Image: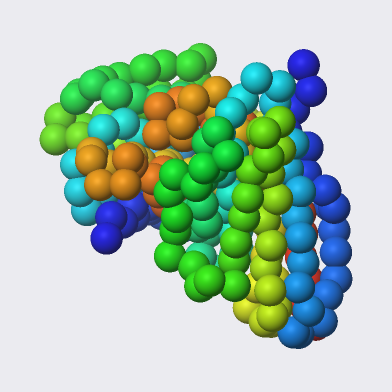
Amino acid sequence: GQQVMQIPQYQHVQEGEDFTTYCNSSTTLSNIQWYKQRPGGHPVFLIQLVKSGEVKKQKRLTFQFGEAKKNSSLHITATQTTDVGTYFCAGRSYGGSQGNLIFGKGTKLSVKP
Amino acid sequence: KAGVTQTPRYLIKTRGQQVTLSCSPISGHRSVSWYQQTPGQGLQFLFEYFSETQRNKGNFPGRFSGRQFSNSRSEMNVSTLELGDSALYLCASSKRQANTGELFFGEGSRLTVL
């Protein structure tokens, strides 16, 4: 079945450093979403990417969707303590059972002030 | 606009018991999806309901079931609880079927099985 792998599992950075998490799917995706879950909270939608090679920016966050639509990345520039949390990618495949949203296991980001 | 509401927020059960969790989606949202979140397995898809019909189902045993009512509220039931069922159960709603747009998650129901 479809699998979505996400690396790294954990990332510890000093405030001001950059951070990147990577997401890889075993199948071609129709779209990919990114969510952020703060400690003790629930996942909150960040963005959806649909087109091959798509790049979207939200302030210090840059999201990319690979040309083959099988991988994606989230890059945070100059991390802040407010960026702490777990970042999940979630991909939908074409066809099948209309595309369950399959989540990666997430990258837990900690930021040292 | 009220968000997704899940009840109860916390509950403790013993092995063999059954549990029912409730989810009220955002007003106007017709799709409700359920996810199980555990530290080791992350977010795992349980099932999705749209217009009172189960549209998709994840790879969970038949002890896990759900339903959706005409007002889009949804319930999930877990029978014959096992220790491994301890998890955060998240409900998410969306306007259309969940394969087309963003999901809005509730705070979750944290189940502990003793």
Q: Can residue A88 be seen in this view?
A: yes
Image quarter where the N terminus of chain A lies is bottom left
* Up/down of A11 relative to A61, above or below: below
Q: Residue at x 58, y 28 (%)?
A: B30
Residue B80's quadrant in the figure?
bottom right
Of residues A16 and A38, the one nearer the viewer is A38
Q: Residue furthest left?
A: A68
Residue B4's quadrant in the figure?
top right
Of residues B108 and B78, the one nearer the viewer is B78
Q: Residue at x 28, y 55 (%)?
A: A2
Q: Residue at x 60, y 61 (%)?
A: B65
* Up/down of B67 relative to A35, above or below: below
Image quarter where the C terminus of chain A lies is top right
Q: Which colour scheme is used?
A: rainbow
Q: Position of residue B39 (x, y in %)?
A: 60, 65
Q: Position of residue A18 (x, y in %)?
A: 46, 34
Judge from the rendering whether residue B22 lies leftward or rightward of residue B58; answer left or right.
Answer: right
Residue B3's quadrant in the figure?
top right
* Up/down of A96 relative to B60, above or below: above
For the image, the number of numbered tags is 0
Q: Is residue A74 visible?
A: no
Q: Where is residue A53 in the image (x, y as percent from the top left)?
A: 20, 24
Q: Which residue is drawn at 15% across and 30% down?
A: A67
Judge from the rendering whether residue B53 lies leftward or rightward of residue B68; answer left or right.
Answer: left
